[in-house]
Amino acid sequence: MRSLARDAVGVLVGALALGGAFWILERAREKSDPRRAVVRMIRRDAGAHDLVVVTDEAPELVAMAAPVPALWGLPQMDDLHGVRRLYGVAPQAPGLAPLLGRFGLGAPVDREGRAVRWDVMEHHLARVVFDASNELGTRVTAERVGGADNGPCPLEGAVLGCHGPEWNRVRAEPHRFDGAELRCIYAHPQSDGALTFRFTDLPPARALVGAVGIDDAGWFPTGAVVTAHLAMRLAGQPEITRDVRAVNRKGVVGYRFELPHARGEATMTVTTPDAGARQFCFTFVLTE
């Protein structure tokens, strides 16, 4: 009996030692990648109808999320019906820019901003019904109003060729924001007038989402704010007006507005008090 007791104690001590070694190893891993703790926290909160998206190539983090569905990379996510909540996890906060551009404003998961949650079902974010970056020259047109560059922006190939210098031309292309790449509509404002977009034949939607920012090539510490004034005229509804601002900071800012489910049109008027290097870029996505 004493031998059996000694053996049991030995097994217990060994298990405790093994557990202690695992704890030390896990703490060391967390120092090299703090997102491990974030993924564990998400795993406790999420379920089978949620999705974790790790923006960089990190299969270990994807494996850690199990049994919650997870993937790494940034796949096309135009239809997420059946997903209740989406969790985005990036090495640093700027890496979430592509998800902000698709889903708009989200809820922070951690204090460092490496993870954000979007309530896909609750906020009607599952399916994209309109993406302005795919509609330049068709359902999205532009003109510059006032100042030396006054006039329409006719379609020239894949860009809207506004009058004036090359940087006046409106185009959809990837830009970098605090190091992270986001495909958005480049729309340099002007100090002596406004750049006005018109969005026509908009389908019924439950939300307007997106992100705005000044790209890395145009950011500097004393830069001015760029304001995008939105006016939406939807069938049978009073006009909806909102302002979205690209403040003078690195990275992008997400936005989200709830909408009545009705067809219509919208305008966006882009202005700034000082256009110097204000390389403004935005996404405009309707979801339901």
Image (spheres, helix red, strand yellow):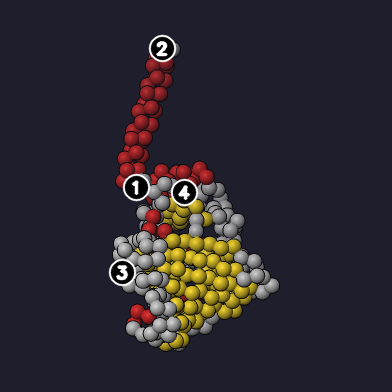
User: For the point 50% across and 56% down, which residue is it?
Assistant: 106
Q: Which residue is mark 2?
A: 2
- Which circle marks residue 33 in the picture? 1
Residue 53 position, x and y percent, is 46, 56
Callouts 1 and 4 close, C-beta under 8 Å: no
* Pick the front one: 229 or 64: 229
User: Which amino acid type corresponds to the residue marked 3 in the rendered image?
Assistant: Ala
User: For the point 31% across and 40% down, which residue is it?
Assistant: 28
- Which circle marks residue 161 in the picture? none
Q: For the residues carrying marks 2 and 3, which lies nearer the camera in this image?
A: 3
User: For the point 31% across and 69% down, which residue is it?
Assistant: 217
Q: Which residue is mark 4?
A: 109
User: Which amino acid type corresponds to the residue marked 4 in the rendered image?
Assistant: Val
Looking at the image, can residue 1 be seen? yes
User: Which amino acid type corresponds to the residue marked 1 in the rendered image?
Assistant: Asp
- Decide if residue 89 is on the left or right side of residue 277: right
